[in-house]
Image: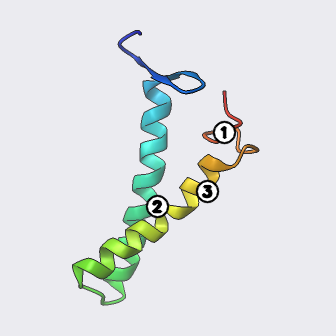
């Protein structure tokens, strides 16, 4: 295994792809937290729940075999 790649179930996944996936999750969570905060919600538990709910979209995309970027159908 090389330093810039990590072993995954279907083969090797490079670090750049993992960083892109992580950035997608972070953007979704951050946007949800920011929207809730700007709407006046300051309860940390509510903000955390919004972040978890926001990550559902990218997770569903990752599980979709037709999603070629990060999904099961990606290379």
Q: Which residue is located at x 69 percent, y 49 percent?
A: 64
Apparent side of residue 75 relative to residue 16 in the rendered image (left or right): right
Q: Residue at x 60, y 40 (%)?
A: 70
**SS at mark 3 in the image:** helix
- When asked about the image quadrant of residue 67, the answer is top right
Q: Mark 3 sits on what residue?
A: 60
- Residue to which mark 2 is pinned: 28
Mark 3–mark 2 Cα distance, whole angstroms, equals: 13 Å
User: Which of the marked residues, 3 or 1, is nearer the chain's N terminus?
Assistant: 3
Residue 51 image point, x, y percent? 39, 68
Q: Earlier in the sequence, mark 1 or mark 2?
A: 2
* Label 3 vs 2, first from the N-terminus: 2
Q: Residues within 10 Å of mark 2 (few under 14, many from 20)?
A: some
Q: Nearer the viewer, mark 1 or mark 2?
A: 1
Between tags 3 and 2, which lies in front? Answer: 3
SS for callout 1? loop
Residue 1, position as x, y percentages in the image: 41, 10
- The residue pinned by badge 1 equals 72
Between the C-alphas of marks 3 and 1, the distance is: 10 Å
Label 2 SS: helix
Residue drawn at the location 42% of the way across and 36% of the way down: 19
Instruction: Report x, y in % for residue 6.
Output: 43, 21
């Amino acid at each position: 295994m090389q330093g810039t790649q990590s072993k995954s179930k279907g083969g090797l996944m490079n670090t750049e792809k993992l960083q892109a996936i992580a950035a997608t999750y972070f953007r979704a969570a951050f946007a949800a937290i920011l929207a809730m905060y700007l709407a006046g919600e300051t309860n940390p538990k509510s903000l955390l729940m919004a972040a978890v709910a926001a990550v559902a979209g990218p997770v569903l995309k990752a599980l979709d075999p037709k999603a070629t970027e990060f999904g099961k159908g990606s290379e």
